[in-house]
Image (cartoon, helix red, strand yellow):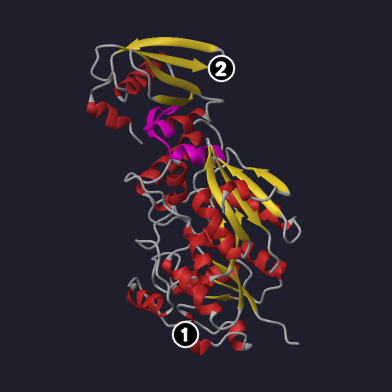
Amino acid sequence: MERKVKAIGLISGGLDSTLALALVKRQGIEVKAVTFYTGFCITETQRRKGGRADGTMPQNEALRAAADVDVDIEYVDISGGAYLDMLVHPKYGYGANANPCVDCRVFMMRRAREIMEREGADFIFTGEVLGQRPKSQRRDTLRIIERDSGLDGRLLRPLSAQLLKPTLPEQEGKIDRSRLLDISGRGRLRQIALARELGLSEWPQPAGGCCYLTDESFARKFFDVLDAREAAGGERRIAEDDVVLLSTGRHFRLSPRAKLIVGRSEVENALLERHVPGRARLVAKDPILGPLALVEGEPTWEERQLAARIVARYGKGRDLPEVVVEWREGELVEEYAVAPELDEGRVEALRI
Amino acid sequence: MDATALPAPDRTLDCSGSFCPFPIVETAKAVRALGDGAVLLVIATDPGVATDMPMWCKATHHEHLATFREGACWKSYLRKRGR
């Protein structure tokens, strides 16, 4: 009996990867979906913080897509040290912000290749569309991703396949090239029409944009961590701990050797509380409790006072002449009676 | 399914304190180690499990028996199905 063709589809749950999943599956190919956890997904962070600002809880789009198209799905955690090292030293550089999209795709494809080999699959496919993204979805970078991941000829982009060189599974007749597509560019009209044709009723709006690394404000904080470590004579590196903190709270650079992070909500205060070890914990105490804040590094006495004043500013006692802020650092517990810092210009100058 | 009518689990997986997507990642690992027809109870504190577990079960063809809140936790019951 002839073995059924099997493929691994990398999905985010966005419209394009959902369509790619459906296009390959409708050719009778056995499909397994794989989705990667990087630690930088905005939707996942929103869920951890109790949902969106409007009170709704975003769903896990990758799981929804796999359920809609009826394919098996595997969640793969790539958020560890090797991924973080790649983010700090990308071979192909960054996009507009802290997004090394080409290197990130190569990293993911290498993991996908391992999964393909483990599963005995014939090829990998993605929802990438030629010309849709300025860095990672150009013809030359699509080729780099294929080459550097060791997937030569085994990486199919079903939505743009007819605009690209035929892959091995197309040449071998494992998938019918004539039933693949020739979509290019940033428009979504063809994808939306195809989704309706395939009976898909749900997809996230807008497309993409789920990665913190593409966010300008997040990128400032990301590079600030690297620059501060290097300036202090350390190595340019990012740790798993940093990833959570970078998406939590308001960040202020008090000096090259000290940074303040102030929680913006009860959920963020609770998240910061989990990252106290190795940092100073500040909390506005008297007369009204909150918010909670962390200080990293080695602040001077003046910087401790400034941190306490900023913490007081974001508490409910901001209009009072004096607020008591508790400073807890290991065994050391001190209380600073400070006037909340109300100089908007000064606070903004420190904001990262 | 009525919570009182749920079968006794063959294995209980406590994912309390871990965030999305790790309850699902751990569930997948646990299910792989179970025999067909076995029942897994997953306990989680991330409310995302309430939407994730039914979708994961649908995609992977395992039987989702119930997910409900109990105090600060969410409990999900599922039955492994052979593919």
Helix, strand or loop at label 2? It is: loop
- Quadrant location of residue A194? bottom left
Q: Please identify the quadrant where the C terminus of chain A is shown.
A: top left
Amino acid type, residue under disc 2 in the picture:
Gly
Which residue is located at x 56 percent, y 17 percent? A330
Chain containing mark 1? A
- Quadrant location of residue A312? top left
Residue A82 in view here? no
| Residue A234 in the figure: left or right of residue A223 | right
Residue position marked by numbered label 2 in the rendering: A330
Magenta span contains residue A242:
yes
Which residue is located at x 65 percent, y 50 percent? B26
Q: Position of residue B19 (x, y in %)?
A: 54, 43
Q: Tags 2 and 1 in contact by the CB under 8 Å rule? A: no
Q: Nearer the viewer, residue B53 or A239?
A: B53
Which residue is located at x 72 percent, y 83 percent? A3
| Residue A188 in the figure: left or right of residue A45 | left
Amino acid type, residue under disc 1 in the picture:
Gln
Q: Nearer the viewer, residue A48 or B44?
A: B44
Local crowd at mark 1 within 10 Å, few (<14), some, or many (≥20)? some
Distance from the alpha carbon under mark 2 to that under mark 1: 62 Å
Residue position marked by numbered label 1 in the rendering: A162
Magenta span contains residue B40:
no
Q: Which residues are magenta?
A: A240-267
Q: Nearer the viewer, residue A109 or A51?
A: A51
Q: Position of residue A253 (x, y in %)?
A: 38, 30
